[in-house]
Amino acid sequence: MNENRNFLDAHNARAVWHPMVDPKVMEANPPIIVARGEGVRVFDTTGKPYLDLVAALWNVNVGHGRPELKRAIVEQLDRIAYYSTFNGYSNPPSIELSVLLTEMLAQEKMAKVLFSSGGSDAVETAIKLARQYWKLEGQPERVKIISLKYGYHGVHLGGASANGNPAFRRAYEPLAPGFLQVESPFLYRNPWTQDPDELATICAGDLDREIQFQGADTVAAFIAEPVQGAGGVIVPPATYWPKVREICDRHGVLLISDEVVTGFGRTGSLFGARGWGVAPDIMALAKGINSGYIPLGATIVNERVAGAWRKDHPLAAIMHGYTYSGHPLACAAALACQQIVRDEDLTGNAERVGAYFLERLHWLKDRHAAIGDVRGKGLMLTIECVRDRKSKQPFAPADSYGARLCANGLARGLVVRWQNGKVILSPPLVFSRENVDEAIAGLDAAFAATPL
Ligand code: PMP
């Protein structure tokens, strides 16, 4: 590996295209090249440390450089690096992990796991299995997928079609037909009410009406994140998900929970939907499943859904799957990762430290006019920035407020991620109160150094 800084800087600009950015912007603003990580900290090629306030991409939940994961991966490498799980073959770690996941999700009656390589794959699998389910059930016209505005479901064509943010859609149109978006229960920004229960009723009602308008017999599934992540850490009112479950049940529509971010403890519940007291029919899992040590996604379906595949039907074969479905190294890493999540009660830690973080964010909000709202659940939090608090007017791209704030955070040793007017905070779940204090002090200084 070439660790020469000049080489890396020069060739990154010349040869690498990065996700989620105009290449010209990235060329003009060279990235932090992260060379090493330890716990809640990462180090760039100069050795400068940063507190990782985003766990890379909301995924390195157990922290960087965990020897337990390294050991599990190396032990599996010593046996075999890879073998497929396609027709006729399997491998021990994928079996063991499937058993563990169905046990962890026993109260949701989850029954079968189909592995993949990441979150977009897991979502795509969920959408395709939902459509296949209805064909096996003898209702082939149930094909439509309803999702939420502001929703993020990855970048494949199905997920992008379910996506509720035009930024991820426009350049790739035409997207797939049969995808519809309904109103998201976003308390800070909505035209109706500041009462959470009333908002839940209004937005759940929108889903109900859309299903009736389309004809329930044409709707396969409703997909949503238990807390909308990339859309801006939108925490729904507590009554929203139970209402959604009731509506889906009433219309026979499958409920898909996209738990790519919320799964495995991040929101202070082991799974996001469980935190709302709701059992989905299908769940998309990735990220925290093995904290990103090796790419892995998983789609898990409950007994109701799995039951359809017990029938003899010409379309019952699962003609879907990835070369890396059930990759042994990724599954071995997941087993070690979930052991840590259990042993260190990272779900409880996310709940406790997250509550403290939110309390401190409210303190921060009182000190800086650019902060319009702070919100979150567990260790999934955000600071929504505004040009004007009263009107909630967001910053315009020309203000370059986010870029300036991030630069000021980086200068103070914080990895700060700016997304569409918000500072995303999703640190490793091993974060401590002392880490929160350090983050708040750094953010306080960064905001103070960033004029409107
Ligand atoms: N669903 C959700 C809710 C996500 O947040 C993401 C990624 N941030 C994805 C799907 C896509 O996952 P990946 O980037 O691993 O494909």
Image (cartoon, rainbow, N blue to C red):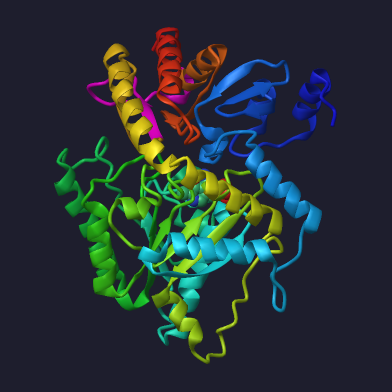
| Percent of width and height locating residue 290 | 58, 48
Q: Which residues are magenta?
A: 380-400
Residue 388 highlighted magenta (yes or no): yes
Q: Is residue 65 above or below residue 140?
A: above
Q: Residue at x 32, y 13 (%)?
A: 368
Percent across and percent down for residue 79 are 79, 58
Name the foreground residue: 364 vs 231: 364
Note whether 291 is above or below 35 in the view shown: below
Q: Quadrant of the N terminus?
A: top right
The quarter of the picture where residue 35 lies is top right
Q: Quadrant of residue 57?
A: top right
Tell which of 395 and 135 is nearer to you.
135
Q: Residue at x 23, y 66 (%)?
A: 246
Answer above or below: position of 449 versus 265.
Answer: above
In this view of the protein, can residue 172 be seen by the observer?
no
* Res 190 seen here: yes
Q: Position of residue 242 (x, y in %)?
A: 24, 58
Quarter of the image where the C terminus is located: top left
